[in-house]
Image: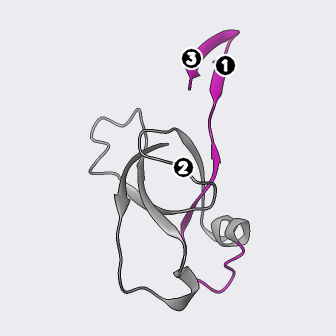
Amino acid sequence: MTVIGTVVASQKVPQLQGYKLLLVADAEERDARAAATVAIDTVGAGEGERVIVVRGSSARAAAGLAEAPVDAVIVGIVDQVDRDGQVIFRK
């Protein structure tokens, strides 16, 4: 996915205090903004970066937020993607 923006929430559940919220979308999606998701950033990602996102119960486990209402967490920043011996993305 690609980070397409930031989310500011002055009021949120205590478990999310201190976490940066980012707006992410599938870079290949035709209408990426319509299909965007808010994700907790655990790796210091920034706007425009391609990231690895986990969802559901795996997201809560990855962030150490087992009791928090979290459905998407950024767990990595992509440096390069290779497919069929070709570099298709490089940071």
Please tell me whether residue 19 is drawn above or below residue 11 in the rendered image: above
The crowding category of the residue bearing disc 2, from other C-alpha atoms within 10 Å (few below 14, some 14 to 19, many at least 20), is some
**Which residue position is annotated with label 1?**
82
Residue 70, given in percent of the width and then of the height, sits at 55, 74
Residues at marks 3 and 1, CA–CA distance in whole angstroms = 6 Å
Residues at marks 2 and 3, CA–CA distance in whole angstroms = 20 Å
What SS does tag 1 mark? strand
Quarter-wise, where is residue 67 in the image?
A: bottom right
**Which residue position is annotated with label 3?**
88
Q: Are marks 2 and 3 in contact (CB under 8 Å)?
A: no
Residue 85 belongs to the span the image colors magenta: yes
Identify the magenta region.
64-91
Please tell me whether residue 75 is drawn above or below residue 28 in the rendered image: below
Q: Which mark is residue 45?
A: 2
Residue 11, given in percent of the width and then of the height, sits at 37, 86
Earlier along the polypeptide chain: callout 3 or callout 1?
A: 1
Measuring 36% from the left and 65% from the top, which residue is drawn there? 7
Earlier along the polypeptide chain: callout 1 or callout 2?
A: 2
Q: Are marks 3 and 1 in contact (CB under 8 Å)?
A: yes
Please tell me whether residue 79 is drawn above or below residue 59 in the rendered image: above
What SS does tag 3 mark? strand
Residues at marks 1 and 2, CA–CA distance in whole angstroms = 21 Å
Residue 88, given in percent of the width and then of the height, sits at 56, 17
